[in-house]
Amino acid sequence: MKIDTEIFDSLLLNYQQRVNRTLDNWLPAEAFNPIELHKAMRYAVLAPGKRVRPLLVYATASALGIDLERVDGPAAAVEMIHAYSLIHDDLPAMDDDDLRRGRATCHIKFDEATAILAGDALQALAFYVLSHDSKMTDNCVARLEMVEKLSLFSGSRGMAGGQAIDLAAVGKPLNIAELETMHIHKTGALIRTCIQFAALSAKTLADDKFKALDSYAKAIGLSFQVQDDILDVTGSTETLGKPQGSDIKHNKPTFPSIIGLQASREKAAELHQQALHSLSIFNEEADILRYISAWFVERTH
Ligand code: GRG
């Protein structure tokens, strides 16, 4: 792979700006009633997040030669689900955090009831976008499959289920397999959804390519979380934009707490290699996906 950092960074910036515009267009204006709720939704979604999930939708679409307009809706929908999960995760009943994306968390900025409703409404809006966006695939079966994937992977057998495992694990010794199962659900499921959204937007896609992309998604879903656990130990609150040491404070099992920092770094590097291997049937059209995998394990926030 020929790494041209400048080209790839500008491509990713372009994708970030693209999804920010799409999100801005779909989110109800603050002037519309109920004003506080719409303010809270916009506040949480439009805060400066990395937009990792939309980037994956666009990068996969680009690797498959799909017109990006077709995946604007899916990219925005998955970010709305992610934003809802962050709002709810920060609530007093869950992690009780007051800093997110470098700003006060939604329930601190507004109030708890508004934050809960903002999360609920964002979840509903994601499905509205998927069912309503006219620029997406004209294949109704593929569109319905996207609704199916997002509901499955964000629900009790995906992200919300992973969160339930996480909450039940607080203060309990987990082994590495149990920790991986938790993250495969909590973080990995939504990352797999991103890749599948792009795959479903393709007019046709050979089965071996779909399997290769899904296997890539599984590897980076876990490497992203391993790096997240590492950064909770080695990062700073300022760079992370969320409280450093939060996992330790909440007595949560993490990769560094179970296998140590060095082994966690090796694990992340191994998952990156697995991701690259999964993409071996693709040529340079998938270099952006290779670049994202490297970024996931090198990132500092
Ligand atoms: C409440 C249903 C429900 C689910 C919550 C995903 C999740 C489950 C909670 C989010 C908190 C968390 C630490 C999840 C692990 C995944 C993760 C590293 C999220 C942070 O994602 P980034 O780094 O955040 O992409 P930004 O702010 O850049 O979008």
Image (cartoon, rainbow, N blue to C red):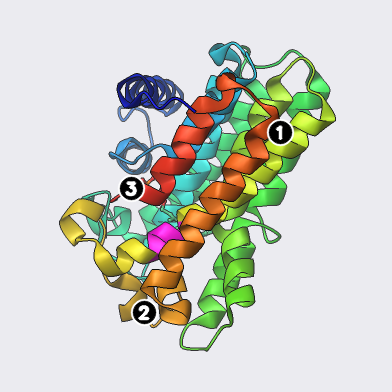
Q: Picture coordinates of residue 8 (x, y %)? A: 38, 24
First to last magenta residue range: 225-229
Choose mark 1 or mark 3, whichever is in front: 3
Task: Please tell me in which quadrant of the rendered image residue 123 appears.
Answer: top right
- Mark 3: few, some, or many residues within 10 Å (few <14, many ≥20)? few
Q: Is residue 147 visible?
A: no
- Mark 2: few, some, or many residues within 10 Å (few <14, many ≥20)? few
Q: Is residue 226 magenta?
A: yes
The amino acid sitting under disc 3 is Arg
Residue in view at x 59 percent, y 10 percent: 67
Question: Which residue is disc 3 drawn over?
Answer: 299
- From what the image shows, is residue 259 above or below residue 62? below
Residue in view at x 56 percent, y 24 percent: 73
Q: CA distance from mark 3 to mark 2?
A: 23 Å
Question: Which residue is disc 2 drawn over?
Answer: 250
The amino acid sitting under disc 1 is Met
User: On the rendering, which quadrant does ligand 1 occupy?
Assistant: bottom left
